[in-house]
Amino acid sequence: MTTKIPQNIDKEDKLVGPLTLKQFLYLLGGSAVTFLVYQYYVIGYLFFTEVVIISLVVMLFAAMLAFGKVNGRPFITFLANVGNFIVTPKHRLWHKENTAETTTTKLSRSAKPRSTTATKAVNKSQLEQLATILDTGGKMEAAELAATHEINNLIAKPATPEIKEHDLGVEDVLSDTES
Protein backbone atom coordinates (compact mmCIF):
# COMPACT_ATOMS: atom_id res chain seq x y z
CA MET A 1 0.00 0.00 0.00
CA THR A 2 1.51 3.30 -1.04
CA THR A 3 0.95 6.38 1.03
CA LYS A 4 1.62 9.96 0.15
CA ILE A 5 4.20 11.61 2.38
CA PRO A 6 3.54 15.34 2.89
CA GLN A 7 6.29 17.63 1.64
CA ASN A 8 7.05 21.25 2.60
CA ILE A 9 5.02 21.11 5.80
CA ASP A 10 6.61 24.33 7.07
CA LYS A 11 5.04 26.44 4.30
CA GLU A 12 1.78 28.22 4.98
CA ASP A 13 -1.28 27.52 2.84
CA LYS A 14 -2.18 29.99 0.10
CA LEU A 15 -5.68 31.15 0.96
CA VAL A 16 -6.24 34.33 -1.01
CA GLY A 17 -4.77 33.90 -4.49
CA PRO A 18 -0.98 33.71 -4.20
CA LEU A 19 -1.09 35.17 -0.65
CA THR A 20 -1.22 33.47 2.69
CA LEU A 21 -3.74 34.64 5.26
CA LYS A 22 -1.10 36.65 7.17
CA GLN A 23 0.14 38.38 4.04
CA PHE A 24 -3.41 39.21 2.99
CA LEU A 25 -4.24 40.65 6.43
CA TYR A 26 -1.06 42.77 6.51
CA LEU A 27 -1.84 44.22 3.07
CA LEU A 28 -5.50 44.71 4.03
CA GLY A 29 -4.47 46.61 7.16
CA GLY A 30 -2.09 48.83 5.17
CA SER A 31 -4.83 49.51 2.62
CA ALA A 32 -7.28 50.38 5.41
CA VAL A 33 -4.87 52.91 6.93
CA THR A 34 -4.20 54.38 3.48
CA PHE A 35 -7.94 54.69 2.91
CA LEU A 36 -8.34 56.52 6.23
CA VAL A 37 -5.54 58.91 5.26
CA TYR A 38 -7.30 59.52 1.92
CA GLN A 39 -10.56 60.27 3.76
CA TYR A 40 -8.75 62.90 5.83
CA TYR A 41 -7.55 64.43 2.54
CA VAL A 42 -11.10 64.50 1.17
CA ILE A 43 -12.38 66.20 4.31
CA GLY A 44 -9.61 68.77 4.06
CA TYR A 45 -7.41 67.94 7.04
CA LEU A 46 -4.39 66.90 4.94
CA PHE A 47 -2.68 68.19 1.83
CA PHE A 48 -2.06 66.00 -1.21
CA THR A 49 1.71 65.69 -0.63
CA GLU A 50 1.11 64.57 2.97
CA VAL A 51 -1.36 61.92 1.78
CA VAL A 52 1.11 60.60 -0.79
CA ILE A 53 4.02 60.45 1.70
CA ILE A 54 1.96 58.82 4.47
CA SER A 55 0.40 56.34 2.02
CA LEU A 56 3.79 55.33 0.61
CA VAL A 57 5.25 54.80 4.08
CA VAL A 58 2.24 52.78 5.29
CA MET A 59 2.07 50.60 2.19
CA LEU A 60 5.84 50.04 2.21
CA PHE A 61 5.61 48.97 5.86
CA ALA A 62 2.66 46.67 5.09
CA ALA A 63 4.56 45.14 2.15
CA MET A 64 7.61 44.58 4.36
CA LEU A 65 5.43 42.86 6.96
CA ALA A 66 3.82 40.69 4.30
CA PHE A 67 6.82 39.77 2.15
CA GLY A 68 10.01 41.01 3.83
CA LYS A 69 12.58 38.75 5.43
CA VAL A 70 15.67 39.69 7.42
CA ASN A 71 18.27 36.93 7.70
CA GLY A 72 15.71 34.39 6.54
CA ARG A 73 13.20 35.26 9.25
CA PRO A 74 9.95 37.20 8.90
CA PHE A 75 10.11 40.98 9.25
CA ILE A 76 7.70 40.93 12.22
CA THR A 77 10.20 38.73 14.12
CA PHE A 78 12.94 41.23 13.29
CA LEU A 79 10.79 44.06 14.65
CA ALA A 80 10.09 42.10 17.84
CA ASN A 81 13.82 41.46 18.32
CA VAL A 82 14.64 45.15 17.75
CA GLY A 83 12.01 46.14 20.31
CA ASN A 84 13.34 43.60 22.77
CA PHE A 85 16.88 44.93 22.26
CA ILE A 86 15.76 48.50 22.90
CA VAL A 87 13.87 47.61 26.08
CA THR A 88 16.35 45.24 27.77
CA PRO A 89 19.28 46.65 29.75
CA LYS A 90 22.68 46.64 28.05
CA HIS A 91 24.85 46.23 31.17
CA ARG A 92 25.12 42.80 32.68
CA LEU A 93 26.34 42.53 36.24
CA TRP A 94 27.60 39.36 37.80
CA HIS A 95 26.97 38.97 41.49
CA LYS A 96 29.18 36.24 42.82
CA GLU A 97 27.45 34.29 45.53
CA ASN A 98 28.92 31.52 47.58
CA THR A 99 26.26 28.90 47.07
CA ALA A 100 27.75 26.47 49.58
CA GLU A 101 27.55 29.03 52.38
CA THR A 102 24.04 30.16 51.51
CA THR A 103 22.66 26.61 51.48
CA THR A 104 24.31 25.71 54.78
CA THR A 105 23.06 28.88 56.44
CA LYS A 106 19.56 28.27 55.17
CA LEU A 107 19.56 24.68 56.41
CA SER A 108 21.16 25.22 59.79
CA ARG A 109 20.60 28.69 61.17
CA SER A 110 20.44 27.52 64.78
CA ALA A 111 23.36 25.07 64.55
CA LYS A 112 26.78 26.34 65.52
CA PRO A 113 29.14 26.84 62.58
CA ARG A 114 31.76 24.17 61.85
CA SER A 115 35.35 25.02 61.23
CA THR A 116 36.16 25.63 57.60
CA THR A 117 39.42 23.64 57.70
CA ALA A 118 37.59 20.47 58.73
CA THR A 119 35.00 21.02 56.01
CA LYS A 120 37.72 21.58 53.40
CA ALA A 121 39.53 18.42 54.51
CA VAL A 122 36.34 16.38 54.26
CA ASN A 123 35.55 17.83 50.82
CA LYS A 124 39.11 17.20 49.62
CA SER A 125 39.10 13.59 50.74
CA GLN A 126 35.71 13.02 49.12
CA LEU A 127 37.01 14.55 45.89
CA GLU A 128 40.08 12.33 46.02
CA GLN A 129 37.89 9.26 46.50
CA LEU A 130 35.66 10.22 43.58
CA ALA A 131 38.69 10.88 41.37
CA THR A 132 40.15 7.48 42.28
CA ILE A 133 36.87 5.75 41.47
CA LEU A 134 36.78 7.49 38.11
CA ASP A 135 40.43 6.66 37.38
CA THR A 136 39.97 2.97 38.11
CA GLY A 137 36.63 2.69 36.38
CA GLY A 138 34.81 1.76 39.61
CA LYS A 139 36.78 -1.46 40.17
CA MET A 140 38.26 -0.62 43.58
CA GLU A 141 37.47 -2.41 46.78
CA ALA A 142 36.24 -0.39 49.76
CA ALA A 143 39.51 -1.02 51.65
CA GLU A 144 41.60 0.21 48.72
CA LEU A 145 39.37 3.25 48.36
CA ALA A 146 39.83 4.24 52.00
CA ALA A 147 43.61 3.82 51.73
CA THR A 148 44.10 6.15 48.76
CA HIS A 149 44.88 9.78 49.44
CA GLU A 150 46.27 11.17 46.21
CA ILE A 151 44.42 11.94 43.04
CA ASN A 152 47.26 11.47 40.58
CA ASN A 153 50.00 8.96 41.29
CA LEU A 154 53.20 9.09 39.30
CA ILE A 155 53.73 5.35 39.79
CA ALA A 156 52.09 3.31 37.08
CA LYS A 157 49.15 1.35 38.39
CA PRO A 158 48.79 -2.31 37.46
CA ALA A 159 46.45 -2.98 34.58
CA THR A 160 42.90 -3.77 35.55
CA PRO A 161 41.75 -7.30 34.79
CA GLU A 162 39.77 -7.83 31.63
CA ILE A 163 36.02 -7.92 31.87
CA LYS A 164 34.58 -11.34 31.18
CA GLU A 165 31.16 -12.08 29.73
CA HIS A 166 29.86 -13.66 32.92
CA ASP A 167 30.79 -10.49 34.84
CA LEU A 168 28.58 -8.40 32.60
CA GLY A 169 25.61 -10.76 32.76
CA VAL A 170 25.76 -11.35 29.01
CA GLU A 171 24.37 -14.63 27.79
CA ASP A 172 24.95 -16.26 24.44
CA VAL A 173 21.60 -16.14 22.66
CA LEU A 174 22.84 -17.71 19.45
CA SER A 175 24.04 -20.94 21.10
CA ASP A 176 20.43 -22.00 21.83
CA THR A 177 19.30 -21.73 18.23
CA GLU A 178 19.35 -24.70 15.91
CA SER A 179 21.59 -24.62 12.86
Image (tube, rainbow, N blue to C red):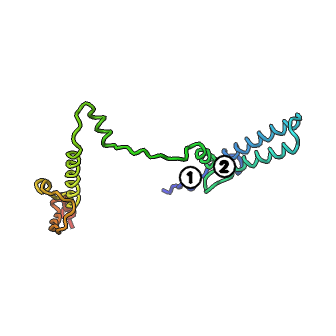
Amino acid type assigned to the residue bearing label 2 in the image? Lys
> Is residue 41 rendered to the left or right of residue 149?
right
Q: Which mark is residue 122?
A: none
- Residue drawn at (28%, 35%) of the image: 107
Query: Residue 163, relative to residue 47: is it above or below?
Result: below
> Is residue 163 rendered to the left or right of residue 91?
left
Which quadrant of the figure has residue 175? bottom left
> On the image, numbered disc 2 is attached to which residue?
14
Image x and y of residue 179, in percent: 21, 68
Secondary structure of the residue carrying tag 2 is strand
Report, in whole angstroms, how far the alpha carbon at label 2 lies from the one at label 1: 13 Å
> Is residue 13 rendered to the left or right of residue 6?
right
Which quadrant of the figure has residue 167? bottom left
Image x and y of residue 124, in percent: 22, 52
| Residue nearer the viewer, 117 or 73 | 117
Image x and y of residue 85, in percent: 58, 47
> On the image, numbered disc 1 is attached to which residue?
9
Image x and y of residue 75, in percent: 65, 50
- Residue drawn at (21%, 51%) of the image: 126
Secondary structure of the residue carrying tag 1 is loop
Query: Residue 163, relative to residue 63: is it above or below?
Result: below
Amino acid type assigned to the residue bearing label 1 in the image? Ile
Q: How many labels were placed on the picture?
A: 2
Label 1 crowd (10 A; few <14 / some 14-19 / many >=20): few
Q: Pick whichever of labels 2 and 1 is earlier in the sequence.
A: 1
Residue occupying the far left of the picture: 143
| Residue nearer the viewer, 81 or 152 | 152
> Is residue 49 rendered to the left or right of residue 166?
right
- Residue drawn at (61%, 56%) of the image: 72
* Label pair 2/1, CB-CB below 8 angstroms: no
- Residue drawn at (56%, 52%) of the image: 9
Label 2 crowd (10 A; few <14 / some 14-19 / many >=20): few
